[in-house]
Image: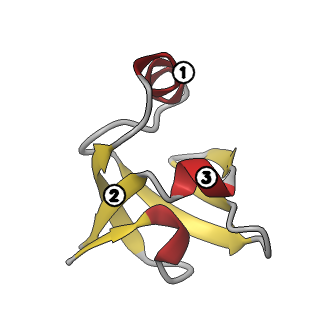
Amino acid sequence: MTDTLNSCPLGVDIEICRIDIDARYAFRLNEIGLREHEKVRVLHKANFGGCVVAHGMERIAVDGDTAKRIFVETN
């Protein structure tokens, strides 16, 4: 099932299948490890739509607008 990062349940392993943002921002996400086919887990959700994801031992905060443009699939 394909969904967006900000609508995923907490604590579930997910795989990023598509990132639909401007190339300059996608490049930065790629640098910090958020890229297609990477496995992540949503740890915390904020009221404004943002979230904190776990990628390995890293914790990455993603703002709400970006989270709506990261499409994921649950495993």
Model colouring: secondary structure
Q: Position of residue 58 (x, y in %)?
A: 63, 43
Query: How far, Cα to Cα, is label 3 from label 1?
Result: 15 Å
**Viewport quadrant of the N terminus:** bottom left
Circle 1 residue: 28
Q: Identify the residue shown where x is 34% and y is 57%.
A: 71
Image height of 69 relative to 34, above or below: below
Q: Which residue is mark 2?
A: 71
Q: Nearer the viewer, residue 34 or 13?
A: 34
For label 3, the residue is 65
Q: Residue at x 54, y 21 (%)?
A: 28
Discs 1, 2 touching: Cβ within 8 Å: no
Q: Nearer the viewer, mark 3 or mark 1?
A: 3
Quarter of the rendering containing residue 21 = top left
The C terminus, quarter of image: bottom left
Above or below, comparing residue 15 to residue 57 in the picture: below
Q: Amino acid at mark 1?
A: Arg
* Residue 1 appears left or right of 65: left
